[in-house]
Amino acid sequence: MPNITKKIVAIAMVLSVSGLLVGPGVAQAITADELQDQINALMTQLSGLQAQLAAMGGGGVAVTCTFTRALSPGVSGADVMCLQEYLNSTGNTLAASGPGSPGNETQYYGPLTQGAVQSWQDANGVVYGAWGGYFGPISQSKYDQLAVMPPAEEEEEEEEEEEPIACVGEEGSYSLIISATPVGRTINAGDGIEAYGIDVTAVSSDITIGRVDFQAAVVNAVTAVAENPGNFIKEIRVYDTSVSDDNLLATLANPVFAQDAAAVWHVSLGSLGFVVLKDTTKKLLIVIDTNTTIDQNRTVTLQVYGNNGVRGVDCSGINTFVALATTRILTVQQPGVATVAVTLAADNPKSNNIAANATNGVQTKEILLSLNAKATAGNAALLRLEVTYASAASASTLPNILYLYDGETLVSSVTPPVSGVAVFENFTLTLVQDVSKNLKVKADWAATTAFESGGAAFVLTYPAGTAADLLAGVYQRVNGQQLGIVNAADIAGNTFWITESGLKLTFVSGTATYTVEGIAGGTGIATGTIVFKVQPFGGTLVEPAYASGATDATAGVVTSGMLVRIEAPWASGGDAAASGAELTIARTLQSSLGAGQNVAEGQEATVTMKMDFGKTTSTANGNISFKVEDICSNVGGTLICQGTSSGIGGAGTGNLLDNWITNSVNMTP
């Protein structure tokens, strides 16, 4: 037991006995006043010993703090610094070195403080639930208890001093390149702008970067007038690799830029201690805070200054100076000046058939259009969005309701008018700067006879618009200003057919190969293979079959089955044809269910279509690819032809197949 602890116990025992001595009926050798004076003296001594024990890490309150508010991550103040000093003095150290370490406490409540508070809470039985690291009323009450009742003492342990890490290597060198990130961009004025990165590669030795001379040019983007960067840049911070309290190397508040004879403004960032291990690369990241009270955009150009801009030292103590002349250019704008753009999403659905029920129509919220909305240069709120549909659509084939979804959340719905424009409005959808939000437009239809015998086609488009007419949509900036979304051209969706019987089609793959052999007297054969899946609804698909090119235009060839036509277009445009004397064409089609097999409703079959395209002479050269041109099917006794034009074997309904196409191959000997 430490000597101070023994003294505290002894004094406590004396005080206990003294309490008994002043009780009634006990003979007193001294007066009550004299005894009280002795007790007071012992109490004073006990208080002093407790303070010494606490300062030695004995578990009591080594630092006396006054808390008048709850403390949580993000706040600053003298009470935060006092809390850090208390935590460091009681074994709940924020950091071993640098900001937050003993003797280097700060006034900022960051992740280090949060972690130390949670460690203290765990050690002292503070129940915090989901509020770990939050120093609120419950934690402050425990702190007050510890101030008068220290926890049970523990045996003192001697701390072992850590041996310094040895420098690896002897004489070495290093190289610099600008980091891939942060990139030049438009960004709001304010704090925490990641501005410039330097990738440092150490060769043959560990390298310690001690200083970076940094230059900046700040120009009014409208008037082209240059200004002292120190009037715009409030603070510069240097980090090891990424932004965090642990990675902070240096802070330069209110930087004073000097101007050289060439009118270049520069400042020195020193005492960095940035260590790059031998034969590795690490990023030195520079972050700036700027003024926000700007009337016009500023163009900020940043780079390392001069021919000796970076100073590094190797393990043998040799200092080396290296330059880096690559710039990063930022356009810094007034906060809140956001712009919203809408683009077609990568998962926009391909054309297909939609199954309609004769009684209920379509009640499955079919996805027709997928869009991405993104705000840049600030947060914004989307308030209104329009879609248009084919003007030829009759009222009977329009959806009875259109839905706008943000992921799985319904944002708005509307009954589309016959006019061809549907407006989603009366909602507020937050757009976080530089984060795309995926929006889906879905539809349901009421039952109609128009969906019989081939069905009806429907397509949605996000229309072009200007800021003046607010045609495409409306968004709101954080300052309340409302603007129109501007897109230069229509964002067209794909065509869907709503029908009571037909095929669900899924493209699987498309490949093309070429071999210089196989044709007597010729130069080679290109082979295209396209694989897709079929799933009939509303009836049975009569066996998949293939009709030859000579009879493609005859309706009779598909009345009893399915026909797929594949053509091989030249890269220069136009379909290849078998009629030319220099070309030969052969086609085959196979179903995974086998020849002569029908596909029942709901059953899925894989169809493999192949086409050989041969050259009989050396003059027919060029790039060629293969694509599906038309699909005709007999499902439930109804013939439907869907392809790139009017279809084959009867009236067609336009392109269903989107880009069912292979890669290109060159038919050159």
Image: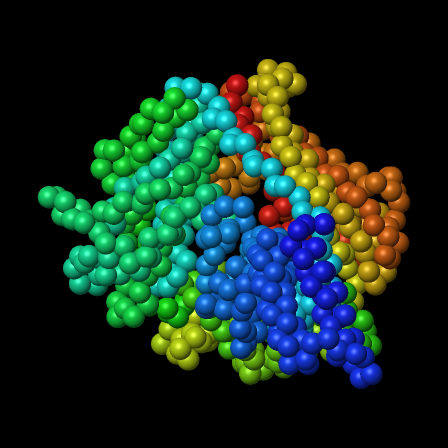
Which of the pair 172/168 is nearer the observer? 168
Q: Is residue 120 left or right of residue 196?
A: right
Q: Is residue 254 above or below residue 40?
A: above
The outermost residue toward the left is: 261
Q: Is residue 344 above or below residue 615?
A: below
Q: Residue at x 69, y 67 (%)?
A: 149
Q: Where is residue 284, by image quadrant?
A: top left
Q: Residue at x 50, y 37 (%)?
A: 571
Q: Where is residue 306, by image quadrant?
A: top left
Which of the pair 115/635 is nearer the observer? 115
Q: Residue at x 42, y 74 (%)?
A: 477
Residue 169 in percent (x, y) is at 46, 20
Q: Is residue 532 left or right of residue 411?
A: right
Q: Is residue 250 left or right of residue 390?
A: left
Q: Residue at x 71, y 74 (%)?
A: 444
Instruction: Count up the numbered dots.
Output: 0
Residue 516 in percent (x, y) is at 59, 18
Residue 668 in percent (x, y) is at 51, 22
Q: Is residue 370 visible?
A: no
Q: Is residue 638 above or below residue 357?
A: above
Residue 104 in percent (x, y) is at 46, 53
Q: Is residue 185 above or below residue 261?
A: below
Q: Is residue 322 visible?
A: yes
Q: How does the figure colour the protein chain or chains?
A: rainbow
